[in-house]
Image: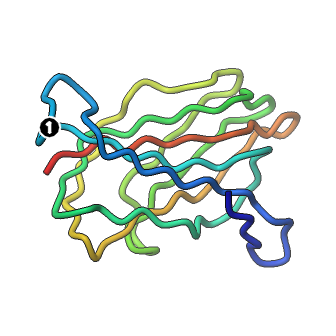
Amino acid sequence: MLNIQVGKSTPVPVKLLANFGPAGPAGPGGLLAATLSIAGDLQLHNGVARWYPPRNVRTATFEAWVGDAPIGGNVTAAIMLNGGSQVIQLTIPEGQNAILPVAGVADLTPADYLTVNVTEVGDAVPGSNLNVRIIFES
């Protein structure tokens, strides 16, 4: 668990998990998954924890879920490539804990990295324990 200070805000606990096992029926050499997690109550911030692909890969889908659903607004996460361009935006609607998988294609090399920016949280309950799973193939 990392505690990351973003600007003058309070530290944001970030848990970075990388799962490199099969993520579907394709088995070894097929679909793989990596998960970026942000523990605790969510707040707006730019992601600093990075996920680097183990080799040249192509993303296929993205999934997102939270432990506590947001109330008074959505949880929106922007998946960023190399700290600059947005690959995809994922929105978990108010009162919901997850979204269906969303297709998003990006070709990545081992020198590229993905981060998660939290760009919207609920007003009454911000949502907590955000997880973003990246499904990719070699």
Residue 57 falls in which quadrant of the image? bottom left
Residue 81 falls in which quadrant of the image? bottom left
* Left-right relation of 125 to 95: right
Residue 104 horizontal/vertical position (percent): 29, 45
Residue 125 falls in which quadrant of the image? top right
* Left-right relation of 124 to 43: right
Kind of residue at disc 1: Pro
Give the camera-side residue of 95 and 82.
82
Q: Decide: few, some or many residues near mark 1? Use Cα within 10 Å; few <14, some 14-19, many ≥20.
A: few
**Residue drawn at the location 48% of the way across and 66% of the way down:** 50
Question: Which quarter of the rendering shows the N terminus?
Answer: bottom right
Q: Which residue is mark 1?
A: 28
**Residue drawn at the location 84% of the way across and 40% of the way down:** 123
Residue 44 horizontal/vertical position (percent): 72, 57
Give the camera-side residue of 108 and 15.
15
**Residue drawn at the location 15% of the way across and 30% of the way down:** 27
Q: Secondary structure at mark 1?
A: loop
7 w.r.t. 78: above or below: below
Residue 135 horizontal/vertical position (percent): 30, 41
Color scheme of the displayed model: rainbow
52 w.r.t. 27: above or below: below
**Residue drawn at the location 65% of the way across and 50% of the way down:** 38
Give the camera-side residue of 53 and 59.
53
90 w.r.t. 107: above or below: above
Give the camera-side residue of 23 and 117.
23
Counting labels gives: 1
Residue 37 horizontal/vertical position (percent): 58, 47
